[in-house]
Amino acid sequence: MNDRTRPLALSLLCLVTLVLFPGCHAKDVNRQLNVVYGEVAGQKLLLDLFHPASQGTAILPAIVFVHGGGWKGGDKQGFDQLAEGMARLGYVTFSINYRLVTSTGNRWPAQLDDTQRAVRWVRANSGKYGVDPTKIGALGASAGGHLAAFLGTTDTRDNSDAALASCSSRVACVVDLSGPTDLADDFAPKVKSGALVNDMIRNLLGGSPAEVPAVAKDASPLNRVDARSAPFLILHGRLDELVPPDHSERLNAALQKAGVESKLIMFDDEGHAFLKKQNLERFVTETREFFKRHLGK
């Protein structure tokens, strides 16, 4: 959500990803960039697809990556390096774009509809790409973590597309990196840049939580947790200046109260972006183990 820290964080993430996937090269992965997974009001919705070059006819689990950027910025390319790394481990991966908020449109729930559509599109095209439709996970960071959380807690909101009507948007497991979970919250007294995030949320919702309380409640994945929710791995920095750490703590507690597997890793020495090599290494290692356990690869 913070443009100043994202480039550095992504550079380090790329470095750690390469370190933790030794002996792998570009030729190990096939890429299909800017694949259209939908279109809304003339705007094409795009994703980048990565799969093992040696896949052949094998049916593999899949992971959908959802970028951050305060719902108004960011791009799918931010997760391409990690998506490639996971493809080298035997997953088919999809790094997606979604409609970004503008001064005049794309308010909530446009982002939810697009993210859910991407998962449903993957299922509808599972035969084409050799994906096991029962083994799809999601990973998102910041605003992307917020959206990924919905994939693990919520059924499809807009089921008007007949071509996707039989395809669920729920995923088998979720990795949530520093995602906000309660958009009715007042961020200003909790974190240094909370007033900035309050403005982002007001822009997303089309009004402040006080002005549009029903929309704020609808846009909060914390309110969607129940016994049907998918397992979660949640990572957050205790020094986060944008998203209060208690958002991850409350999500973790709600999941566990509902009897759902959830693991929270709180980095005491990190902010919104994970910058320290040892923490990035733990993030990648924990993520690999989590997806292996729940997606069977």
Image (cartoon, rainbow, N blue to C red):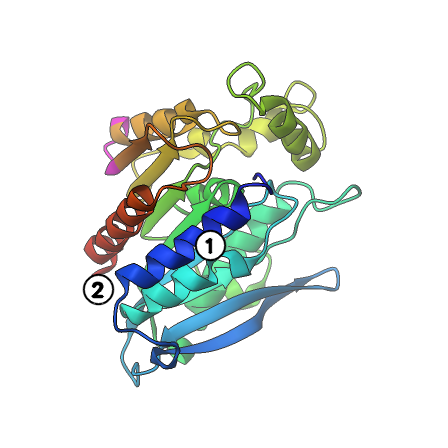
Q: Position of residue 167 (x, y in %)?
A: 44, 61
Is residue 181 positioned above or below 82 on the image?
above
Q: Residue at x 57, y 18 (%)?
A: 186
| Dominant SS in magenta | loop
- Upstream in sequence: badge 2 or badge 1: 1
Is residue 57 positioned above or below 121 on the image?
below
Is residue 184 positioned above or below 66 on the image?
above
Q: Position of residue 104 (x, y in %)?
A: 80, 43
| Magenta part of the chain | 257-262
Q: Is residue 116 left or right of residue 238?
A: right
Mark 2 closeness class: few <14, some 14–19, many ≥20 residues within 10 Å:
some
Q: Can you identify the residue that label 1 sits on?
A: 11
Residue 64 shows in the view: yes
Residue 158 shows in the view: no
The reply to whether the magenta stretch includes residue 98 is no
- When asked about the image quadrant of residue 54, the answer is bottom left
Q: Can you identify the residue that label 2 sits on?
A: 297
Q: Position of residue 105 (x, y in %)?
A: 75, 45
> What amino acid is found at the position of numbered circle 2 in the picture?
Lys
Mark 2 to mark 1 CA distance (whole Å): 27 Å
Q: Secondary structure at mark 2?
A: loop
The N terminus lies in quadrant: top right
Q: Which residue appears farthest toward the bottom when viewing the image?
A: 56
Q: Nearer the viewer, residue 265 or 184?
A: 265
Q: Nearer the viewer, residue 114 or 82?
A: 82
Mark 2 touches mark 1? (CB < 8 Å): no
> What amino acid is found at the position of numbered circle 1 in the picture?
Ser
Q: Secondary structure at mark 1?
A: helix
The C terminus lies in quadrant: bottom left
Mark 1 closeness class: few <14, some 14–19, many ≥20 residues within 10 Å:
some
